[in-house]
Image (cartoon, grey):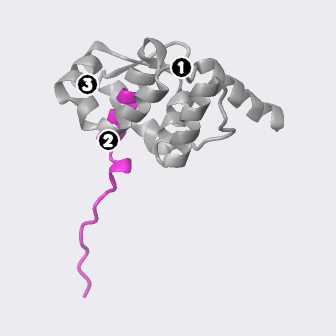
Amino acid sequence: MFNRKKSSVIPELRPMYKVGKILLILKICCSGNKGSLLKLHLFNWAMLEPERLKALKISSEKKELLLGVWGIDPSLNMALSFATAENLLSRKSNGSYQLTEKAETFIAGAGLLELFDNETNDLKIINKKITETMVQQTAKRWNDEI
C-alpha cells in the first residue's frame, strides 16, 4: 500500500510570494506605482531567469525593449486577483494595477524590500526605465505579425 506524502510547493507558485513580487515591481519599476498587466507579466517572466533579467537591464539602458516575446503566467493573474481582493491593489479603468495605501503599509511593515533583497537590487537598476510605451509597442508587433 502506498502512503501519499505532502509535496512542497515551490515558492514561485505560492500566492503570497507572487503578491510580494508584484508589489515590488509596481513600487520600484512603475511610474505612479501603476502598471499594465503586460508589464507585470514581462517583469515576472524576466525575473525567473538571470539571462532574461539581464536582457531587461540592457533594454532599460538602450531605452528599447530587446525582448520580442515573453511568457504569460496564470499564477500571476491569480495573485493579482488575490491582491486586489485584499485591497493591496486597485484596478484602474484602463486595466492597469496600482498600489494602494494598504500596500504601502504592507511593504514597509513586512520589510518587503529587505526580504526580497536580491530582487530589489536588480529592479532598482532597471528602475522606471522600461516604460508602458515600450511594452505596448512590443505587444503591437505581436498583432502586426499575425
Mark identifier at residue 95: 1
Mark identifier at residue 107: 3
Tag 1: amino acid:
Gly
User: Residue 75, how many percent across, how many down?
Assistant: 44, 44
Q: Disc 1 to disc 3, how far (Cα)? A: 23 Å
Q: Residues within 10 Å of mark 2 (few under 14, many from 20)?
A: some
Mark identifier at residue 14: none
Quadrant where the N terminus is found in the figure: bottom left
Does residue 114 appear left or right of residue 50 in this picture? left
Between marks 1 and 2 in the image, the one whose residue lies nearer the viewer: 2
Q: Earlier in the sequence, mark 1 or mark 2?
A: 2
Q: Earlier in the sequence, mark 1 or mark 3?
A: 1
Quadrant where the C terminus is found in the figure: top right
Between marks 1 and 3 in the image, the one whose residue lies nearer the viewer: 3
- Viewer-proximal residue, 35 or 51? 51
Q: Which residues are magenta?
A: 1-25
Provide the secondary structure element on which disc 3 rests: helix
Q: Residue at x 36, y 28 (%)?
A: 24
Q: Disc 2 to disc 3, how far (Cα)? A: 13 Å
User: Residue 133, how many percent across, how many down?
Assistant: 64, 18
The image quadrant that residue 33 belongs to is top left
The image quadrant that residue 131 belongs to is top right
Provide the secondary structure element on which disc 1 rests: loop
- Viewer-proximal residue, 46 or 15? 46
Q: Residue furthest right?
A: 145
Q: Residue at x 36, y 25 (%)?
A: 84
- Viewer-proximal residue, 58 or 10? 58
Q: Disc 1 to disc 2, how far (Cα)? A: 22 Å
Vertical relation: 90 (above or below) 115: above
Q: Which residue is mark 2?
A: 17
